[in-house]
Image (cartoon, rainbow, N blue to C red):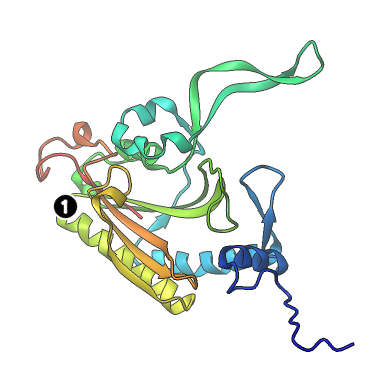
Amino acid sequence: MSNAGSTKSAISPRRDEDFPEWYQQVVRAAELAEPSDVRGCMVIRPWGYGIWENMQRQLDAMFRATGHRNAYFPLFIPLSYFAREAEHVEGFAKECAVVTHSRLEVGPDGKMKPASALTEPLVIRPTSETIIGASYAKWVQSYRDLPVLINQWANVVRWEMRSRLFLRTTEFLWQEGHTVHEAEAEAREETRRMLGVYETFVRDHLAIPVSTGEKSESERFPGAVQTLSIEAMMQDRKAIQAGTSHFLGQTGIRLDDQLGDEHAHGGRRRHDAW
């Protein structure tokens, strides 16, 4: 029997039929990642994690070349920290996972249940501006301690109803840089410089062409004065945000009490996140 005219594809559906689903199937078939039993999360398999390690190694070297150092901050953030920065937190409030109890115990029905309620709920890190700001306020005792140039490699949690492998999951790996500067001009230059690092990395090391630009007011990072981004074009002609750098102005890190008015340039120090 002739099979003339029939086409068999290793991946179904084909890319031209359903690009988003084709991408998900390619990730699975290549054994890069797969959905977890935990809703919205994924398991990064060895091939996929190896790619992440190579990306991390290269990007970390580029960060160090610009004078940044690595640190690590807590996964759990007191709820009161978020209350201090209402504008910033508002953009993440509906995505936050919150820990309210410290242990489990067996109930009368033989089932496990939460016990020992916490005095203050703890938010699982959706981003780290508030907790890092608390440390910076202790570290910076004088304008001579500036600038502070820190990067963190970590995981974050943001509840997602519709997950996509490597694109949108409840828990994901990332890095976040947080810097503090004495003057606004210096902070804005840092914002542009780190976007340039992202652009170079994606273009020269990942071989992905990107466009750079500034986000509109409605698209800015919550609480940011300015958000710059690199955008890549997917094969279905939709843009995807591939990296961001934010000038947060005087948001998030309060250093006035430690530094006083000398060299204040109009008040609180300027903060960047990228």
Q: Quadrant of residue 68?
A: bottom left
190 displayed left or right of 57: left
Residue at image mark 1? 184
Residue 31 in picture, x, y percent from top left:
71, 65
Mark yes or no: residue 171 visible.
Answer: yes
Which residue corresponds to the image point at 31% horizontal and 31% vertical from the top-left? 86
**Up-down relation of residue 136 to residue 100 (above or below):** below
Residue occupying image coordinates x 44% and y 70% = 237
Q: Quadrant of residue 141?
A: top left
Q: Residue at x 76, y 83 (%)?
A: 6
Please, is residue 112 above or below residue 128 in the view?
A: above
- At label 1, which amino acid type do we have? Glu
> For mark 1, does the 10 Å Cα neighbourhood hold few (<14), some (14 to 19), or many (20 or more) residues?
some
Q: Residue 84 appears at what percent x and percent y?
A: 31, 29
Where is the C terminus found, in terms of image quarters? Answer: bottom left
Q: Position of residue 209 (x, y in %)?
A: 41, 76
Q: Could you say whether the residue bearing mark 1 is in a helix, strand or loop?
A: helix
Q: Is residue 180 left or right of residue 49?
A: left
For residue 99, side relative to residue 143 (left or right): right
* Whether residue 151 is visible: no
Residue drawn at (49%, 54%) of the image: 174
Measured from the top left, where is residue 148 in percent x and y?
30, 51
